[in-house]
Amino acid sequence: MSEEQDWRARLNGRRVVASISGGKDSAALGLWLLEQGIEHERVFCDTDWEHPDTYAYLRGPLTEKLGPIRELQSAGMVAGIRAHGMFPSRGRKWCTDELKLAPFRAYLGTLDDDVVNATGVRAEESDKRAALPAWEWSEGLDCESWRPLLSWSFAEVVAIHRRHGLAPNPLYLRGAERVGCWPCINSKKAEIKLLAETDPARVAEVAALEAEISERRGAPRAFFNGKTGRGTVAPIADVAAWATGRGQLVILPADESPGCWRWGLCERPSQAGTGEA
Ligand code: SF4
């Protein structure tokens, strides 16, 4: 049985719901589903914490090419931080669960059909993703997860954008390695540098939240999980200074946890750095 015969047999009239993040891989997924003539709907989980370019891209060029994209709302990142009195962290990663998985699961629960969730996850992006199967039961979403682009190369992602005359999210062209929360708690140094250099308003917003939560807690709290070279909590001012080469060492922990990327709810930077143009 060919790969196509296999997925056509598995789909067999089931309802396909595609996860759209505003990034290149999920855009490629949407284009590919259209090319294959697979009936589907598109869903975006809004954290209310995306870059303005992502909202504009999603609601503009991407919708024009793919068709309507349903936006699922959550309380939002800022409201979540205030409600928890803490930032999400590797140990308490409530952001993925509450801002993305829970709204998505709730939406899927309103559908009577047997649902397949299609995502744009690609093996090339990391060893961990390479270990994922094309089909898997998702306990988190309580449906089957399908990764039809798992074996795709970056060149194939670019090619399908070109075939359909769809430019990528402009964030990539400005140097971003990923599309997701702006910023994500697991941002890499280059991403924080881009944030610091292009969006002082968001940096100030994070700094104000840090001050607010630190005061409530009676101890320093920070958005990123990094430590300064002295081993103390690294507030965004220190992290931004370090990322732009103006400050002292900050140590960010490597993110090993399966987060949004596993379910195609956002992207992660590629290991090999081959991910973007
Ligand atoms: S992109 Fe990052 S900050 Fe946003 S929900 Fe996912 S892990 Fe949390």
Image (tube, grey):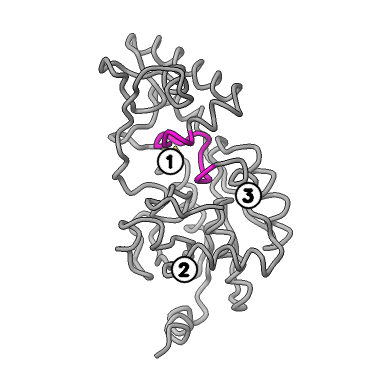
Q: Secondary structure at mark 1?
A: helix
Q: Secondary structure at mark 3?
A: loop
Q: Secondary structure at mark 2?
A: loop
Residue 165 lies in the magenta stretch: no
Q: Horizontal placement of 4 versus 186: left or right?
A: right
Q: Which is in the foreground here, disc 2 or disc 1?
A: 2
Mark nearer the N terminus (2 vs 1): 1
Front-lying residue, 61 or 154: 154
- The residue that appears at 47% across and 46% down in the rendered structure is 100
Q: Which residues are magenta?
A: 176-191
Residue 227, quarter of picture: top left
Residue 203: x and y in percent read 54, 22
Front-lying residue, 33 or 79: 33
Residue designated by label 1: 98
Q: Horizontal placement of 100 versus 233: left or right?
A: right
- The residue that appears at 30% across and 38% down in the rendered structure is 254
Q: Is residue 41 above or below residue 75?
A: below
Amino acid tagged 3: Asn
Q: Neighbour class for label 1 at 10 Å: few (<14), some, many (≥20)?
A: some
Quarter of the render that holds ligand 1: top left
Residue designated by label 2: 152
Q: Neighbour class for label 2 at 10 Å: few (<14), some, many (≥20)?
A: some
Residue 189: x and y in percent read 42, 33
Q: Is residue 84 above or below residue 116?
A: above
Amino acid tagged 2: Trp
Mark nearer the N terminus (2 vs 3): 2
Q: Which is in the foreground here, disc 3 or disc 1?
A: 3
Q: Quote the CA–CA distance across marks 3 and 1.
A: 25 Å
Residue 23: x and y in percent read 56, 52
